Amino acid sequence: MAIESINSEASPRSVAILGSTGSIGCNTVDLIQRNPDDFVVEALTGNSNVALLAEQAVRLRSKLAVVADPSRLEDLRDALAGSSVEVAAGRQAVIEAASRPADLVMASIVGVAGLAPTLAAIRRGCIVGLANKECLVSAGDFVMAEVARHGANLIPVDSEHSAIYQVFETERVSSVERIILTASGGPFREMSKAEMAHVTPEQAVAHPNWSMGAKISVDSATMFNKGLELIEAHHLFSMPEDRIDVLVHPQSVIHGLVAYEDGSVLSQMGAPDMRTPISYALGWPNRMAAPSARLSLEEIGQLTFYAPDPDRFPSLKLARQVLRNGGGAPTIFNAANEVAVSHFLGGRIGFLDIAEIVEQTLEKVPSRRLENLDDVDQTDAEAREAAEELSTNC
Ligand code: NAD
Ligand code: MG
């Protein structure tokens, strides 16, 4: 990981937020608005929520607002009529927003749709706050190679990875034995498999500790989120799969741990509020104030931990397998999960079908060696097609 950036000390820092209308995006907007002297906003992007995007653009005096859905351009133009905010629409315009000269880009689009814009930001060698874990799962080797080539600073926003990043002694990498990701266990932590067969999308998105977008909430409930995070951690910290552990910790107080060869284990703790890891990235390499609830260990009293159950939550075993297999396997794993989650949210398949579809897609689609990003796109498309077909036959 590169440490220096020419722009890291610039003040006010210019920022672009990809996916500003989502859960991470709104929290980022909130933090920027609380520190108006420290940031100027270069660009905001959203998928289709034009009203919120326009309102954020005016509130933050963004220079540019981009809606990814091209059919919403006129609506965005109307909503921003009379303002000085430039408007644009479409996939390419989102990539252009990421290419604007911002010191920091918050990559908070959900899914592999975030890959191309995130890469555009990385290629400018700026600071990239990375929430969009799917791009690392799908194309991790290519993303990390571009980070190194362009001297970008990739600062994890995912709470577990932010925690590990904060206690990972980069100057003593050889003394790191293992890294440990904690998991809340999600809303169905104590449910039997028979009960899980009947859960609804509404139950799945109601997370006990975190308030998040729909897709990651379902991923948390299936624990595919932890599988995606295992692959994300492998790329961010160059750790082999067998040196990354997952520990269920229902209170979500300890977010990640690093175990060193002398027996020391360092961890980062905090109340479960994404504004803490987001502010860590926004302010990096400095810390900035965040309004997250303060941690009272006295009130919490007890912290508990246990190993995840591989039978009720097969996602971790699958994630380890795809990481060991390498090639296009993680790309297929991610794409199949994205398709299955969207069908579950649409009420077309059951909760337990998600893991089934991912497993069957992995069996059906050949995992070829990935030579370049076009190979990633092709493997992603093949996996989507197979997962779509499996979903219709559910
Ligand atoms: P969300 O669904 O709330 O927001 C997603 C954002 O991406 C929205 O602004 C949406 O308009 C935009 N978007 C969706 N599809 C798009 C497309 N095809 N093209 C362009 N833009 C598109 O999601 P979220 O919960 O904010 O999560 C965003 C990312 O951060 C995900 O990768 C997630 O795994 C990760 N993450 C989220 C949290 C959290 O607390 N929400 C925590 C850790 C990591
Ligand atoms: Mg996380």
Image (cartoon, rainbow, N blue to C red):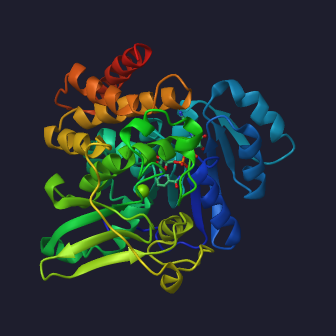
Q: Is residue 4 visible?
A: no
Q: Is residue 346 visible?
A: yes
Image height check: is 20 above or below 27?
A: above
Q: Nearer the viewer, residue 391 or 286?
A: 391
Image height check: is 15 above or below 77?
A: below
Residue shown at 25% from the left, 72% from the top: 258
Tell me which corner region of the image, top left, top right, bottom left or bottom right, holds residue 327. Answer: top left
- The percent position of residue 199, horizontal first and vertical second, equals 51, 37
Residue shown at 60% from the left, 75% from the top: 293
Does residue 261 appear left or right of residue 370 in this picture?
left
- The percent position of residue 260, horizontal first and vertical second, equals 17, 77
Residue shown at 45% from the left, 39% from the top: 111
Tell me which corner region of the image, top left, top right, bottom left or bottom right, holds residue 259. Answer: bottom left
- Residue reaching furthest bottom? 298
- The percent position of residue 68, horizontal first and vertical second, equals 60, 33
Q: Quadrant of the C terminus?
A: top left
Q: Quadrant of the N terminus?
A: bottom left
Image height check: is 103 above or below 90?
A: below
